[in-house]
Image: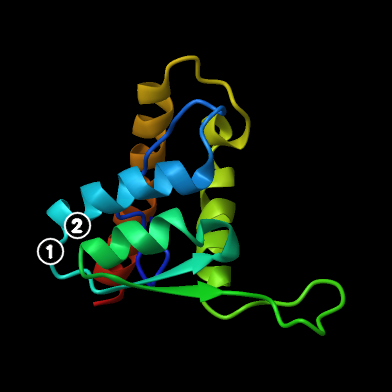
Amino acid sequence: MVDTQGLVLKALVTEANYQDGVVARWLIELLARQFPRLKKIWADSAYRGVLVEAAAALGIDVEIVEKPPDQDGFEVLPRRWVVERTFAWLGNYRRLSKDYEYWLDSSDAMIYAAMTHLMVRRLARLRAAV
């Protein structure tokens, strides 16, 4: 789950045998406790159903971002590009570019380490500009 700037709020790495909607329900429950001011989530159409129901029970509005029915080929969708950009940032880190990790906790930790590195570099650039 990322914020509107594409920075990771919470990562949840699971085995591949879990459906995205099920994992999203677990994630929304964690987020509701950690970020009580969370009021709106934009999600892909794959998260319709379980995520929408779980979020509604927690008082969080979910807006499903769908591609237009007349769309042919690739088109940048509003709000969806934020998550895709985050995936691109994470892909720049060698250990996250492929599935090298054996343990789920290691993958989870590498996501947070990569985002911490990215945020510290941004802060350093801001400080140098002042």
The residue sitting at 36% across, 48% down in the picture is 25
Residue 46: image location, x then y, percent: 58, 57
Count of marks placed on residues: 2
Q: Which mark is residue 50?
A: none
> Secondary structure beneath disc 2?
helix
Kindly tell me whether residue 10 is visible in this rendering. Answer: no
| Relative horizontal placement of residue 90, taking residue 31 as reference (left or right) | right
* Tag 1 residue: 36
| Relative horizontal placement of residue 73, taking residue 93 as reference (left or right) | right
Kindly tell me whether residue 98 is visible in this rendering. Answer: yes
Residue 83 drawn above or below residue 30? below
Quadrant of the rendered structure where residue 63 is? Answer: bottom left
* Tag 2 residue: 32
| Relative horizontal placement of residue 68, taking residue 55 as reference (left or right) | right
Q: What's under tag 1, amino acid-wise? A: Pro
The residue sitting at 38% across, 72% down in the picture is 4
Distance of label 1 from label 2 (alpha carbons) = 5 Å
Pick whichever, 129 or 46, lies toward us: 46
The residue sitting at 42% across, 64% down in the picture is 6
Could you tell me which quadrant the N terminus lies in?
Answer: bottom left
Residue 127: image location, x then y, percent: 24, 68
Is there a contact, CB below 8 Å, between mark 1 and mark 2? yes
Could you tell me which quadrant the C terminus lies in?
Answer: bottom left
The residue sitting at 24% across, 50% down in the picture is 29
Q: What's under tag 2, amino acid-wise? A: Ala
